Amino acid sequence: MIRHILISVFGAAALSCLAQGVGLSGTVTNKANGQKLQGVTVALAKTGLSDTTDSLGAYRLGSATGILSYRSGGLGAVSLDLRDRILWIHSGADASMRIAFFDLRGTLVARVFQGRMGQGTHAVTLPPGLPAADMLLLRLDGEGLRAVYKYIPSALSGGALIAMDRDGDGAASRSAAVPGAAKSASSGTVAAVADTLRVRRSGYKTVELPLDSYTGVHDIAMEPEGTGCVAGTLCWDFEEGRIPDGWTVYRTEFTGTLLVDGSKPHKGAFALHAKDLLGGKEGNQGGPKRTLKYALPAGFGPVLWGRVYVYTSPARPVSHAGLFNARYPRPGSASTAVNTLDWYEFATYQQTYMGVWHPPEPPGFPEWVLQSDKQLVLDDWACLEWEFDGANGTDPEAADPRVWVDGLELSWPTKFTFSDPAGAAKPKLEKAKDFTFLETGVYLYQGLSLATNWWIDDLAVGSRRIGCN
């Protein structure tokens, strides 16, 4: 049985939009560096029609060839759009309608819908079993109307519709692809468009672009949020060509080197390089560590935002690989000795990003672990951001760590308490008064059997979000 799903009418603005046709597309990039942005929501403000950008930063609203709109006495305005194997139909009136696929010889292949369709917008799932490689004709017959489309199948998008014929006489009709707004068959006038293209993504300022047409290409550059390296923010770009002032060597275990060199800077001439780290065995405790430490100014405060660019090669480590941590005295303690401090950590584990809260180290557990399903960015620069909120308002405990990768905040589908031996209860995340200590570089708690390199650049910390700018 062919499944017909009735979708509620969008409202007057949506009907106007659908009747006129939507064919908007473009690419969204980071204004600061030109990077194509994935996961950006692009939506029409009045209708709610939206899309999310892909890995190339591309979006598409409506059909790539424009929604096709017709007008007849019985049906009023009718428009069709195909997206992800869903055929969207807007009928301007309650009327009988028949929609079916035919091959190029005119033989029926599959019925999509036959019956009475109420006024409004409807969604119909394409029937299964349509030929995957053959072009078909999609024909709509209604009260005083026939519309014919070429259907081009696509495994990725579910297919595309191209206008072929408005009245069944076989003549091609390019004018059926609406070039901005629908024209009334009786008057030939163009309906005005007044809408806004709203572009949103976490970590970037919202863009609102006024529209006077529902078709066209709009490439959009988004400005990152954050303060950047302004007064009050501590920033290190390693352009001195050496370890920056205030940072000193901290952990050195197994094989590898930590130095500032020019082998792969994010920008400028230099970056911090954790070079050829190697040692131990995956699954066994103990791994290579090469890090630096830094004492924060007194009175830094209980909230620490951070930003760093990291490049990892040639493989994603399976072991727990820490990249940055920030520590603070326990409530009621005046000690700033490292082994007495609670701490937040940003790291990778099992080839994905994670955030951790620890009690003092040693032993550093039971620890509260939040693991994402976002794979470590390999052989490319990634902008990594974090918020360690040790104050957390009136809550009795400090907040869980928050982490962003290239402007997108990570979710934590896996949360657990790690302890050795296992079985400890979740630790209380003790609140902070002031962060006092930073550590960066790379430190693995289990082995690493393949020599691996990390480059670290444009590190910054502050009391407000810094952003990838």
Image (cartoon, rainbow, N blue to C red):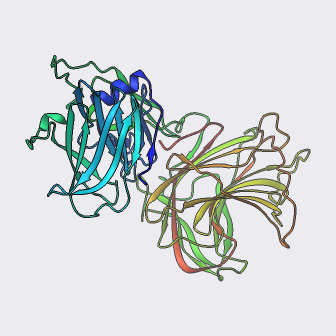
Q: The N terminus appears in which quarter of the rendering? A: bottom left
Q: Residue at x 7, y 41 (%)?
A: 171
Residue 70 lies, in percent from the top left, at: 23, 31
Residue 85 lies, in percent from the top left, at: 37, 51
Number of marks drawn: 0
Residue 431 lies, in percent from the top left, at: 82, 44
Quarter of image, res 450: bottom right
Q: Between residues 235 and 76, which one lies in front from this camera angle? A: 76
From what the image shows, is residue 366 above or below residue 42?
A: below
Q: Between residues 384 and 198, which one lies in front from this camera angle? A: 198
From what the image shows, is residue 130 above or below residue 224?
A: below
From what the image shows, is residue 439 above or below residue 77?
A: below
Q: Is residue 210 visible in this depiction of the protein?
A: no
From what the image shows, is residue 156 above or below residue 465?
A: below
Q: Is residue 27 left or right of residue 359?
A: left
Q: Is residue 257 visible in this depiction of the protein?
A: yes
Q: Residue at x 53, y 78 (%)?
A: 451
Residue 229 lies, in percent from the top left, at: 53, 39
Q: Residue at x 43, y 58 (%)?
A: 265
Quarter of image, res 13: top left
Quarter of image, res 345: bottom right
Q: Residue at x 34, y 49 (%)?
A: 112
Q: Is residue 45 left or right of residue 394?
A: left
